[in-house]
Image (cartoon, rainbow, N blue to C red):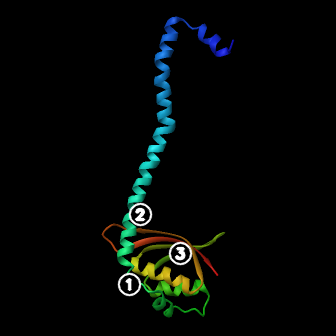
Amino acid sequence: MSPILTWWQQRTDSEQRTLKIASPIILSAVFYLLVFAPLYGSYASEKKRLEQLKSTYLWLAENSGDLAAPYICQSVDTTSAPKEALERLSRAEGIAQSSWTQTHEGWSVAIKSAQGRSVLRWLEASACVGASITHVDIQRVNNHSPLVNANVGMLLL
């Protein structure tokens, strides 16, 4: 006989009845705590992030209509090193609070409270100096402001 069956047969009738009633309740609670609650929490946070991304996307679509790469590339100094050219352009665009960090994948640039159009022009200009953007995360400071925070990953060729 299996050890579980032996253990079960050693229980009194009242213990067996209690276990039969309590087991589904305990198993349901364990399932809820270990499976359902974490999945639902993850779903809710992803849903909130999706709404933020939709809002940012709509704002970007609305505010990026006048960007033209040929015009932007004409205003970029392509004779200097890409990092210096992009730093100079960020100052020219009024992007005052940017920090550059070298990573194992290239460069990470954090831009804080800058005009959204300036950031978009700066991103366009990065292609003119041979930079390859690996990721961009743009978030509006708030829904009523043209200011954005951005984190940009890039490879400087």
Residue extending furthest left? 144
Q: Secondary structure at mark 1?
A: loop
Pointer 1 residue: 66
Separation of marks 3 and 1 at Cα, in angstroms: 27 Å
Can you give x and y, in whole percent of width and height, for residue 113 in the image? 41, 73
The answer to whether residue 30 shows anywhere in this view is yes
Verify CB contact (< 8 Å) between mark 1 and mark 2.
no
Of 66 and 131, which appears nearest the observer? Answer: 66
Residue extending furthest right? 1
Q: Nearer the viewer, mark 2 or mark 3?
A: 2
Q: Residue at x 47, y 30 (%)?
A: 29
Question: In this rendering, is residue 40 above or below 46?
Answer: above
Verify CB contact (< 8 Å) between mark 3 and mark 1.
no
Precedes in sequence: disc 1 or disc 2: 2
Q: Tell how many labels.
A: 3
> As drawn, is 25 to the left or to the right of 12?
left
Can you give x and y, in whole percent of width and height, for residue 39 in the image? 48, 44
Pointer 2 residue: 53
Q: Residue at x 44, y 49 (%)?
A: 43
Q: Secondary structure at mark 2?
A: helix
Q: Quadrant of the C terminus?
A: bottom right
Precedes in sequence: disc 3 or disc 1: 1
Q: Amino acid at mark 3?
A: Ser
Q: Which mark is residue 32?
A: none
Precedes in sequence: disc 2 or disc 3: 2
Q: Residues within 10 Å of mark 3 (few under 14, many from 20)?
A: few
Q: Amino acid at mark 2?
A: Leu
Q: Quadrant of the N terminus?
A: top right
Q: Amino acid at mark 1?
A: Asp
Verify CB contact (< 8 Å) between mark 2 and mark 3.
no
**Picture quadrant where residue 9 is located:** top right
Q: Secondary structure at mark 3?
A: strand
